[in-house]
Amino acid sequence: MFFFPYILGGHLIPMIDLARVFASHGAKVTIVTTPHNALLFQKPVDRDRNLGRDICFHMLDFPTEKFGLPDGCENELNTTSGVMFAKLFKATMNLQHPLEKLLRETRPDCLVSDRLYPWTAQLSNNLGIPRIVFDGTGCFSHCVEESLRRYEPHENALVPDTERFALPGLPDKIELKRSMLPDYVKTENLITSFLNEALEGEIMSYGVVVNSFYELEKRYADFFCNDMKRKTWHIGPVSLCNRDNVDKLERGIKTSVDENFVLNWLDQKKPSSVLYISFGSMPRITPLQLLEIAHGLEASNHPFIWVIGRILKSNSDSTKQDRSDGGDLLPQGFEERLKESRRGLVIHGWAPQLLILEHKAVGGYMNHCGWNSIIEGVTAGVPMITWPFASEQFYNERFVVDVIKVGISVGNEEYWEPWKAQPRVTVVRKRVTSAVNQLMAGDMDEEVAKMRVRAREYGEKAKRAVEVGGSSYAGVEAFLEELSSRRRRGTETSRPEMVTAR
Ligand code: UDP
């Protein structure tokens, strides 16, 4: 099996986990990536090899110089501006020829490709190699996108930007506002064309593997399979392949904090008393919004760990837009006060998220509704405060709040382009404080108490899903059996009957 991960952190990290899941089930796995990205994940892969698993990297040169990128800049995590990201995006197109050469020479049983390499669809089909799509999201957001495409409920002229409209055809009543939709959904632009290509690529592929488990998304997994006709395997949560602390810690990016310090800090807190706050791998917050969060958290009186990743510094010239780690932008004396009261911990940079989330002191998780964050929060069994910014995050918020009912919304209703740094605030400090107080108030709030129970139950189901006899375990086995039988039959690539492997 060949795995071909994308250049975004939220795609790369789960794809490596996915490859490791298949290797742990006995597949011969090759991760095809660029040298710097391979280096990031060398340690977990070496540990797997020491356990006797058949997993390795195949490196493709990345044309950094040709595209004016600094040496080693091979994923979004290393970019410092929107312009740099655009160069990176273009540079990935140059991987086409080396990948084709490799596939021609080696003829793997399948290529698991990120959805955002639409060109791998035609390439795989030409070579008769089944292309399996992976994009790090769950089924739910794809179902929402399908409803928007088919029925265009947002095009109804009577729908103002800030009024809710329902999404037709879905298993539950799901409502959105136009203000929550990306520009590329409302008006055709270059991103629309690119995403249409990605969709066409998915439709002409052999199937889709999903980082989710059947029990979590049942009705949407069925919709994706029966209504949208995708052959699907639910094989997650893939993060559970990280069984030891060292694996949870060294999951690609080097953490900016000593994990023992964080774990000791958590050990001193009461069970379920700490709120963990992280907005994922990309820069999303502006300096003004950062201040509102800081004041909001300080006024809440609940313990918290806040990961401040890269901050979007406002700059009229987007080529010079630089990103800070937030240290110089916090309210005066903020971190000193937290240190003194031991009420909060700020991590500047990258946090050992899996280790933190699974600690018994963590009782809530404020996140941006990236799918990895959601599935990792679900796995940890903690209720959430949802704060979507962009991409499909507003759809995922509905899943958390309305479908599985394990979270409350902080109330952001405005789509926020991450690469357009603006001095904007969409959630004021009072809203932050009240959401935190509501979620962390223990069992005082009846609704939240029920959420806690549901979240815990989903966490248990997630862990059961990947064990022998669980749905995701069976999904991986079913997938491998299908590949093996294809190989035995020596068949050509053709779209088979649609069935969901459970
Ligand atoms: N992550 C992490 N430490 C951090 C920030 C993020 O380990 O400090 C990981 C997180 O566990 C998740 C991924 O980065 O696996 C973020 O993925 P997600 O889809 O939630 O967000 P996005 O891709 O939108 O940034």
Image (cartoon, helix red, strand yellow):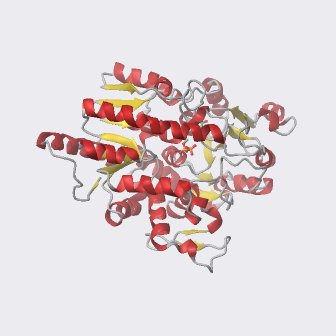
Q: Is residue 319 left or right of residue 271?
A: right
Extreme residue in the top direction: 50
Residue drawn at the location 56% of the way across and 39% of the way down: 357
Residue drawn at the location 69% of the way across and 39% of the way down: 306
What is the tally of numbered marks visible in this picture? 0
Relative image position of residue 121 (x, y in whole percent):
34, 47
Position of 303 relative to 40 (above/below): below
Position of 293 relative to 79 (above/below): below
Question: Does any portion of residue 20 appear in the rendered image?
Answer: no
Q: Quadrant of ligand 1?
A: top right
* Quadrant in the picture for residue 327: top right
Q: Nearer the viewer, residue 259 or 73?
A: 73
Position of 130 relative to 105 (above/below): below
Relative image position of residue 151 (x, y in whole percent):
47, 73
* Quadrant in the picture for residue 407: bottom right
Residue drawn at the location 52% of the way across and 41% of the way down: 10
Q: Is residue 242 left or right of residue 66?
A: left
Residue drawn at the location 62% of the way across and 72% of the way down: 164
